[in-house]
Amino acid sequence: MNRRNGNKMAGDCDSFQMESKAPEQAPSMEQKNGEIMDSEEVENGKSEPINPLAMDGTVTAPDGGWGWVVLVATILVLALTLAFPSCMGIFYTDLQTEFQASNQETSWVPSIMTSVLHAGGLGFCFSFQPAVTILGHYFVRRRAFANAMSSTGTALGLCTLPLLGNYLHTELGWRGSFLVLGAVLLNCCVCGAVMRPLGGPRHRGQPLINHRPLQLKEEKLKGRMRALWTGLMTALRRHMAFDLLRNNLRYRMYAVGITWMMLGFVVPLIYLVPYATAHDMEQSQAALLLSILGIVNIVVRPPIGLLFSLPWFKGCHTYVFSAALLVNGLSNSICCIDASFPVLLAYVVTYGLSMSVVGSLMFTVLMDTLDMSRFPAALGLLAIMESVTLLIGPPLAGILVDRTGEYFYVFFACSATVASSAVFLMVSFYWLDRRDRRALKGQQVPPQVPPPKPASGNNLIPQCQYRSVPTEGDKDKAPDSATGDVTRL
């Protein structure tokens, strides 16, 4: 009986301890790569979170891990979005013939497509801007390399889409080609599915269904309109960096220079194929020029990213970017020499080399001008500013072609526009750096303090009077009272 009762009591105690420890053993929910996960999985070694939180609660960039998957997805997104408007030159003549339109009217097709891509509202923008923003959060130490590698996506698109578009144009015509290319662009959805947001555990509130009836009773129409207006203004201040444009002089100069650059940066890619075919070049050869341009970018951009991520080039990204932009602008004048294949081949190689450096450093220079937490807002405002010049650039070039009847005037105008923007950026940032160095030098100079005047010994405190320390030879000659004063000091 005693043994049985003892076993029963021991079993009850064990069950009580298990019940009391049950709440402590309940797996807490933690977030991994934007997903909710059990903490037991982390403890058992089944999975590790790629985004550890710092001690102060801030999110640290992994600089690897799942970031490499995000990088590959960003490369594909840029290949499908940024490079696609440039391939419209293959269908330029067909659109102009089909709709009996002038160069000015036909150029609105790639113009609107490129402008909306940067300004927002439609699919290309919803793919391009979030990809670049998320990539900047995943990489900090390797950000220059990540941006350079992501910019190869544009080169990848320029290398493959023209050849694909030319093949589809030959087999299916421009209407069938657009259907197939539209299906190819749906792969942006797959790329977006692997982009997991960084952040700590999400604290979910009560379901809205529990509060909605109460809110509907308490809120009035005037209060809802006020809240809507306040939310709209808050969203504009948060997602549109108007305060940076007003207070950050470096961002203002960069935004103005890039906006002016975009007036002629994309236009040569749109008019290269029509310019070549107008001078009796085969359309396949003209499409091959765009592919060669993409190949040059693919080969050059990765080593450029590795090179400029070294500590030696820290602080020099802006000047390298401006110099490459100057070469890119001047290279457009090569097309004014002749429209033969060797000349245009030399043009696309020179243009591609300079374009590789510009594309690799464009977002890096923007990130250097401001805090990373403001990068999405700064990129959004810059994209809207760019969209204005991207919208009017091709139609202005079309007007120039309709008035003169020659395409080489377009390349000459683009050369002057891009080169002038490069000079503006170079001079502006040199002046800003020189001003900052002067200000820093002025802060480091210590204040000129006048030397203290010698005071008479009568005004000094006796304990603070200066006395020389005697040497061994002086101790024998000095009186005992003097020695006592020195040892007391």
Image: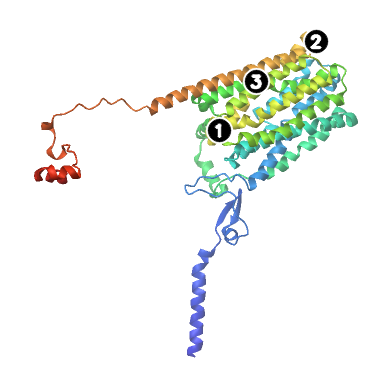
Q: Decide which of tag 2 and tag 3 comes sooner along the chain.
A: 3
**Can residue 109 be seen in this snapshot?**
no
For residue 405, the mark is: 2
Q: Residue furthest top?
A: 404
Residue at numbered disc 1: 314
- Circles 2 and 3 in contact, beta carbons < 8 Å: no
Q: Decide which of tag 1 and tag 3 comes sooner along the chain.
A: 1
Residue neighbourhood size for the residue with mark 3, other residues' Cα within 10 Å, grouped as few (<14), some (14–19), many (≥20): many
Q: Is residue 267 left or right of residue 425?
A: right
Residue neighbourhood size for the residue with mark 2, other residues' Cα within 10 Å, grouped as few (<14), some (14–19), many (≥20): few
Q: Amino acid at mark 3?
A: Leu
Circle 2: element type? loop
Q: Quadrant of the C terminus?
A: top left
In front: label 2 or label 1: 1
Where residue 109 appears, as percent x and y from the top left, is: 76, 23
For residue 326, the mark is: 3
Q: CA distance from mark 2 to mark 3?
A: 28 Å
Where residue 352 appears, as percent x and y from the top left, is: 73, 27
In front: label 2 or label 3: 3
Q: Residue furthest bottom?
A: 1
Q: Amino acid at mark 2?
A: Gly
Q: CA distance from mark 2 to mark 1?
A: 47 Å
Q: Amino acid at mark 1?
A: Lys
Circle 3: element type? helix
In the image, residue 259 sits, relative to residue 315, either above or below, namely: above
Where residue 135 appears, as percent x and y from the top left, is: 62, 39
